[in-house]
Image (tube, rainbow, N blue to C red):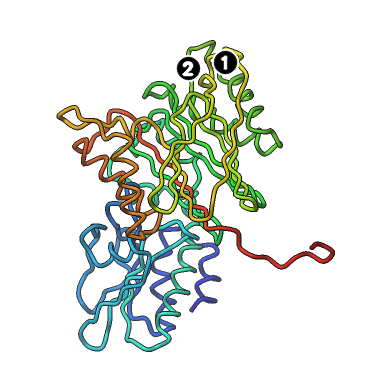
Amino acid sequence: MLAGLLEAGQEATLERLPGLVDRYARRAGIRQCLIYVADLQQSTLRLLAENGGVAGPGPDGKPPAELRIDATYGGRAFQEVRILRKPGEGGLDCWWVPLLNGAERLGVLRVLMGGTPADEADVTALSSMVALLMVSKRTYSDCYPRLVRSRPMNVAAEMLWHLMPPLTFANAEVTVAGVLEPAYEIGGDAFDYAVADDIVHLAIFDAMGHDVAAGLAANLALATCRNLRRHGADLASNGEGIENLLLREFGEAARFVTAIMAEFDLRTGMLTWVNRGHHPPVLIRGGRWVTSLECAPTPPLGLGLGLPVTVCREQLEPGDRLLLYTDGIVEAGSTQGQEFGVARFVDFILRHCAARLPVPETLRRLIKDVLDHHDGRLQDDATVLLTEWHGRVGTCPVKGEP
């Protein structure tokens, strides 16, 4: 099954993938395999169909084209990132299998098959293969964005979604997850992260305004940050480089961007950051202790004031969670004018930490709560970047090292 799918999938387009998956899955005794993909706001799972059709008839009738993540068996498998098995008739069970690109949740597989002890390993291997093929093909497919979008997207959002990294990354030592709303009308918010050896680079940006120019400013800030970082610039120099570019492109004080740029050392647990006129990071320790990491602020990027940059440091502990956020999260107001607020924001994270939900699921529920508080429409971008340090994983020493 896996070898055949890998070979056949090399030159297949995304639209052909459902038919290939269903065909080769039958080699492992799978009666039917359907691919459901999460929409951009992670509220719905949508059937990825071959050329607009369902990939083969199922014995229990035609499957639904959409599934609500908060109200279905498949949605529960997506939320909890675990395989769920629902007994069926005629000796066939329905398996809902998370579709993961590392820690990034792409959707779920709906698998119909009989039950044997080896089945779970088979469907897990199949889902890993399908995820790899999907990720390799979605970058040049218009079918994928059409499937995951529920309404038209503005130009600023189109630019930013293609520039930002996946919403989730995880390994044995760290988990990083981000969320951004309004997904279809982003103005000037953006986040970035990257891992290089033992250093995790983190950044969050909030450009003035909520138009295409704000999107351009955020794009320039993010791209410049990456470019200078990859050339070895430190945090202070990186900020200066971003400011110089913004001044050159927009003029003095015409467009400014607030930001936090940080580096986290996985070996030592040392967090280093600069604050360019942004809300301070929030640190959660032991699921209870909360503090804001205050740092002498430097003016936002793009004002051209030429003031010195303060680089701050904080020693983190295994299990710590670090929150970077933009003002749209805490300033989101209800129809009665009541802000969501920092206290409610942090309390939400604490309660879901206690429930031991996966980090990306915590953020999915957070943004849903923020949207509900604002009756489904935000007046400003709301972005969160959450980092959880699991602690240093022991490694075998290199010969000659202690």
| Disc number placed over residue 348 in the picture, else none | none
Residue at x-position 26% and y-position 76%: 58
Q: Write down the residue under mark 2.
A: 255
Q: Position of residue 215 (x, y in %)?
A: 44, 27
Q: Position of residue 251 (x, y in %)?
A: 54, 11
Left or right: where 163 falls relative to 99: right
Q: CA distance from mark 2 to mark 1?
A: 8 Å
Residue at x-position 52% and y-position 19%: 299
Residue at x-position 61% and y-position 52%: 266
**Which residue ends up furthest to the left in the rendered image?**
336
| Observer-nearest of 84 and 321 | 321
* Crowding near the residue tagged with mark 1, few <14, some 14–19, many ≥20 C-alpha atoms within 10 Å: some
Q: Amino acid at mark 2?
A: Arg
As helix, strand or loop, the secondary structure at mark 2 comes to: loop
Q: Amino acid at mark 1?
A: Leu
Picture layout, residue 369 above or below residue 211:
below
| Disc number placed over residue 247 in the picture, else none | 1
* Crowding near the residue tagged with mark 2, few <14, some 14–19, many ≥20 C-alpha atoms within 10 Å: many
| Observer-nearest of 368 and 187 | 368
